[in-house]
């Protein structure tokens, strides 16, 4: 980390053990909770070697290169740190962290799911990637509401729609996922409550699993049945 030694601004992160952290690998083939290692970091704002006088309001931005300990895939992140001069450097905190390369891909539901459900889910995921967790919570709730309508729920309130579907035999894990999305969405809209990144990510995974049960697995069974029919018709035709 030689680059920070000539910087004008103090480097609060230098004081900490910040070399490794647990994260979800951005490689979709890897994509598990893995250890990531910090390979390089440089101050990009304000420019350390420039004569330019800038008002930073105490913000220092670093560019960091991380690699996945499992697959070696690299990611570049920008980190904003508020430089609190006059206080101990330990108190300087990471204000935000954003993956800039490779650009984080939005989550997608299978094409077996209805188009409106898929587009709501993808939009929610884009909000999640941008760090807008309240909006992501609202969006994931909207995707679940659309799943309920697609499954034939007729009640007005989402809570009642889910109960209606539960009474008609919807699998319990799907019902639980729907209620989780309903609660997060309601908190995001009405309670002005922002959930943490990991909680929103867990919710997205619950909806992915619900879509697997409701749309993907039945579609696969249909495709297998069609293939069986086609095979037996071909066998009869060849006799
Ligand atoms: Zn990896």
Image (cartoon, helix red, strand yellow):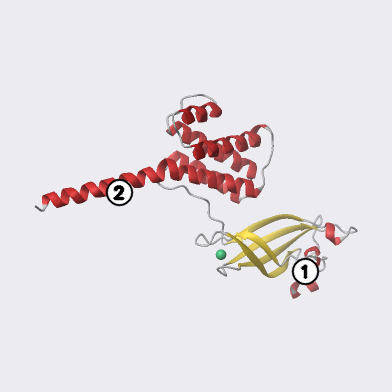
Residue 3, image x, y percentages: 74, 73
| 59 or 219: nearer the viewer | 219
Q: Quadrant of residue 168?
A: top left
Residue 48, numbered circle:
1
Q: Quadrant of residue 71?
A: bottom right
Residue found at the very far left of the displayed protein: 239
Give the SS element for disc 2: helix
Mark 2 C-beta closer than 8 Å to ligand 1: no
Residue 94, image x, y percentages: 75, 56
Q: Earlier in the sequence, mark 2 or mark 1?
A: 1
- Seen at 90% across and 58% down, the residue is 86
Nearer the camera: disc 2 or disc 1:
2
Residue 194 appears left or right of 15: left
- Seen at 59% across and 51% down, the residue is 129
How far apart are labels 2 and 1 at the CA level? Answer: 62 Å
Q: Residues within 10 Å of mark 1 (few under 14, many from 20)?
A: some
Q: Residues within 10 Å of mark 2 (few under 14, many from 20)?
A: few
Residue found at the very far right of the displayed protein: 86
Residue 50 appears left or right of 158: right
Give the SS element for disc 1: loop
Q: Is residue 5 visible?
A: yes
Residue 63, image x, y percentages: 68, 65
Picture layout, residue 130 above or below residue 175: below
| 68 or 3: nearer the viewer | 68
Residue 13 appears left or right of 238: right
Q: What residue does disc 2 label? A: 224
- In this rendering, the count of numbered labels is 2
Residue 173, image x, y percentages: 51, 40
Residue 230 appears left or right of 209: left
Q: Quadrant of ligand 1?
A: bottom right
């Amino acid at each position: 980390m030689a680059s920070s030694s000539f910087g004008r601004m103090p480097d609060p992160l230098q004081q900490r053990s910040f070399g490794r952290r647990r994260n979800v690998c951005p490689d979709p083939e890897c994509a598990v909770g893995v250890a990531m290692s910090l390979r390089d970091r440089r101050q990009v704002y304000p420019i350390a070697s420039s004569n330019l006088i800038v008002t930073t309001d105490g913000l220092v931005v670093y560019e960091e290169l991380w690699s996945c300990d499992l697959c070696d895939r690299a990611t570049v992140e920008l980190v904003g740190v508020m430089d609190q001069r006059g206080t101990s450097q330990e108190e300087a905190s990471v204000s935000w962290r954003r993956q800039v390369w490779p650009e984080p891909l939005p989550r997608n539901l299978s094409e077996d799911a209805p188009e409106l459900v898929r587009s709501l889910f993808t939009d929610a995921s884009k909000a999640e990637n941008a760090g807008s967790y309240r909006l992501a919570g609202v969006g994931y709730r909207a995707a679940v509401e659309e799943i309920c309508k697609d499954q034939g729920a007729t009640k007005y309130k989402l809570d009642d729609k889910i109960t209606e579907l539960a009474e008609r035999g919807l699998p319990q894990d799907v019902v639980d996922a729907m209620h989780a999305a309903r609660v997060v969405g309601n908190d995001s809209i009405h309670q002005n409550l922002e959930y943490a990144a990991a909680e929103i990510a867990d919710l997205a995974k619950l909806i992915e699993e619900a879509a697997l049960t409701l749309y993907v697995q039945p579609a696969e069974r249909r495709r297998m049945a069609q293939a069986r029919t086609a095979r037996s018709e071909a066998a009869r035709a060849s006799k």
